[in-house]
Image (tube, grey):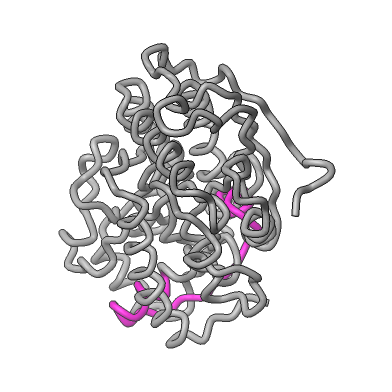
Amino acid sequence: MHPTRPTRRHILNAGLGLSLAGLAPLAAHADDKYPSRPITLVVPFPPGGSVDIMARHYSEPLSSALGVPIVVENRAGAGGSVASQMVARAKPDGYTLVVSSQSSHLANPLTQPKVGYDPIKDFENIAILGRQPNALVVHSSLPIKTFKEFIDYAKKNPGKLNYGSGGVGSMGQLNVEMLKAATGVFTTHIPYRGGTPLITAVLGNEVQFILDNLVIMLPHVQAGKVRALAVAADQRLPQLPDVPTMAEVGYPQLNLTSWTGLAAPGGTPDAVVQTLYKAVRRAATSPAMLASLKERGVIAPEEMTPAGFEKMMSERLVKFGEVVRKAGITAE
């Protein structure tokens, strides 16, 4: 199903100023006929969030690598399900793609009974665009400076701390449910409609903490408006060298990074999938892209084939499926 009137489109042939002249088009090497016209890259969330930022990061280098314009289209709704379902039903010709995320392709299928798509069967999961470390972030007004102090405070004040997420059944909620199961703390969930209102709520102390994507909060952490207590990453981040990892504070099971990926409708020809995969890898490993991702706190994607990407997704669906069942989370 294709929309007759897109909500927001941008043909990005410039924008981030990445120097990518060396990325010769890949199309002729894999498929002489693909791509021969603009490709629509659907973002399942409003402009300004971490998934949208990643899409716009990649639009120019992918356009350079493929030799055709990339049209970025924001189609928000139902926590990413509206756009994901639309792309799942689109013609599998490689001209309609979706920027996938743990919210749209992991949390939603687990928590929305009528989501309308299977993240494995209904998509060709092509490549990871980047990994975003999650972080436990608290409002700076709290008398808490370390992860241990946070746990002690939460246990001494059960129900006093509210945490925010991008909605019921979002990854922000699932992350905190994992935290609660691991530590035994009790906190109250306040859902918001997406990342932008969540940021406003955290900065305004409507909620006292989040365990969510660090990318959206990093500028505010660096400005001292909120405080990061631990990051979910394999090692400390250069932007926050004094903030320990989850493993360092004793909870390696919480050391899960979020991911943003690229997916096509199920049944897309393998030659097309491979062309797109090679374009992503070429873009992701360019010096300009690596520097830009690092600046924003995004971990550059490792080389993971479409089969490896799908395997990782399947494993996380099982892992977070247990969290959803135990917590009884359902997003209507």
| Residue situated in front as seen by the camera: 209 or 66 | 66
| Residue situated in front as seen by the camera: 79 or 115 | 115
Q: Residue at x 42, y 70 (%)?
A: 176
Compared to 135, does 311 lie above or below? below
Give the magenta-colored segment's residue range: 176-200
Compared to 231, does 50 lie above or below? above
Quadrant housing residue 251: bottom left
Compared to 213, does 170 lie above or below? below
| Residue situated in front as seen by the camera: 284 or 232 | 284
In the picture, the quarter occupied by the N terminus is: bottom right
Residue 213 x/y as whole percent: 43, 52
Residue 164 x/y as whole percent: 53, 63
Q: Is residue 225 magenta?
A: no
Farthest residue to the front: give it.
Answer: 32
Q: Report the label total.
A: 0
Residue 140 seen: no
Q: Residue at x 34, y 35 (%)?
A: 281
Farthest residue to the right: give it.
Answer: 4
Q: Is residue 199 magenta?
A: yes
Q: Residue at x 63, y 49 (%)?
A: 45
Residue 187 seen: yes
Q: Residue at x 49, y 38 (%)?
A: 54
In the picture, the quarter occupied by the C terminus is: bottom right
Residue 287 x/y as whole percent: 30, 21
Compared to 317, does 35 lie above or below? above
Residue 78 x/y as whole percent: 68, 63
